[in-house]
Amino acid sequence: MSFQTDLLNHIPIDPLTGAIAVPIYQTSTFAQEAPGVNKGFDYSRTNNPTRQILENLGAKLENGAAAFAFSSGMAAIDAVIKRLESGDEIVAVADIYGGAYRLFEKVYAKFGIRTRYVDTSDLEQVKAAITADTKLFWVETPTNPTLKITNIPAIAALAKQHGILLCVDNTFATPVSQKPLDLGADLVVHSVTKYLAGHSDVIAGLVVAKTEELGREIKFYQNACGTGLAPFDCFLTIRGIETLKYRFQAQADSAWKVAQFLEQHPAIEQVYYPGLPSHPGHELARKQQKSFGAMLSFHLRDDTCESALALVQRLQQFILAESLGGIKSLVCLPCEMSHKTLPAAARAQAGIRDSLIRLSIGLEETEDLIRDLDEALSPLFNKKISNHIPIHS
Ligand SMILES: *Cc1c(COP(=O)(O)O)cnc(C)c1O
């Protein structure tokens, strides 16, 4: 049976009523027949029927033993870090999501958990950062916003060799494109807010564990800290996951064409998209991803914040906003927005220039997006070129 069919089969018909859509069990507590005798649910912080269906779906999506839904991507990341103890160390990807950086540096550092940031696409840098206290590798691949690719099987082998756990933030790739647990990772986290939910209408997170044992640990923190996802948000997320594959494929196809257009544009210095042969991670992405994804970024020849800002303001089809992965195309200036919490030096280390512009490609028609970009870029070059450039598909 194909994966998508199997996935849809994991969404049960409601046994009580035959409802096709998953019911929203908006209840805090459940009647008990006798003390401790119940139908598998006693309190919604601990377990809720709507959440349980989403969590089964999450485990299925990533081929994990168990999955847990959280009130945000950050709460999901937080549950993984809570496994660590004072004195433990993390080796994390340098161009890390800004919120994860803030969590590691402003929350966990004061509890004695230290993080070393390296370019995880270079295994030698990862090796050099390992100490006797390293307990966790934290990887995003592709990264945000320069789409660097880390070799998951290689870093997983290194982790095993040193008894270190590997967690991959799979938000950008989605399980449609890449399944880190199959490639050797121990844990996967998602900002479900992005592609999995997919409609910019919910904040949610997911942790998927490769083993039952790791799953029990994550479940413990979800319950102990009260960070589980609310029933209505679980419902929205389930509905998003039902169409994830087709949304993501269409968005990725469009992104590939937009990337080709931008790469040939004379006002643009460089495009970061793993589907382009010019991208340093292209060959690796071909191997470990099924799709190059729907995120891309670029910087201008005129590498100033003012130019980038003016360009972004000329765009009509791209909404200036944080976040990504929804059905509407978004544009973001990482240095002013998503990565503002990173100090300038960390931004430079991560290759985030002043004029770097990040696009999240949505479900609008590709030609409309390209025309919009062309018009917005034309003052930087004095003419439009979209009519003259053949876009190969
Ligand atoms: C958005 C994002 C997060 C945080 O998720 P929230 O749902 O906003 O809490 C974590 N990692 C990546 C890669 C993200 O893009």
Image: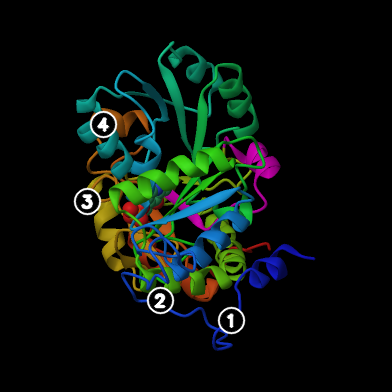
**Residue 61 horizontal/vertical position (percent):** 60, 57
Indicate the quadrant where residue 80 lies: top left
**Residue beneath disc 1:** 15
Q: Residue at x 71, y 70 (%)?
A: 5
> Is 354 displayed left or right of 57 in the figure?
left
Q: What kind of residue is marked 2?
A: Tyr
Dot 3 amino acid type: Glu
Distance (Cα) linking label 2 and label 4: 34 Å
Q: Ligand 1 within 8 A of label 4's CB? A: no
Q: Earlier in the sequence, mark 4 or mark 1?
A: 1
Q: Which residue is mark 4?
A: 108
Q: Are marks 2 and 4 in contact (CB under 8 Å)?
A: no
Instruction: Name the front one of labels 3 and 2.
Output: 2
In front: 334, or 161? 161
State the separation of the CA atoms marked 4 and 1.
Answer: 44 Å
Say whether marks 4 and 3 touch (CB < 8 Å). Answer: no
Would you call the spot at circle 1 few (<14 residues within 10 Å), some (14-19), or many (20 or more)? few
Q: Disc 1 to disc 3, how far (Cα)? A: 58 Å
Q: Secondary structure at mark 4?
A: helix
Above or below residue 389? Residue 328 is below
Task: Give the extent of the magenta segment.
Answer: 280-298
Element on which disc 2 rests: loop
Residue beneath label 2, please?
25
> Which-is-in-front pick, marks 4 and 3?
4
- The kind of residue tagged 4 is Tyr
Horizontal relation, residue 171 to residue 323: left or right:
right
Residue at disc 1, secondary structure: loop
Residue 18 visible? The answer is yes
Above-or-below relation of 391 to 297:
below
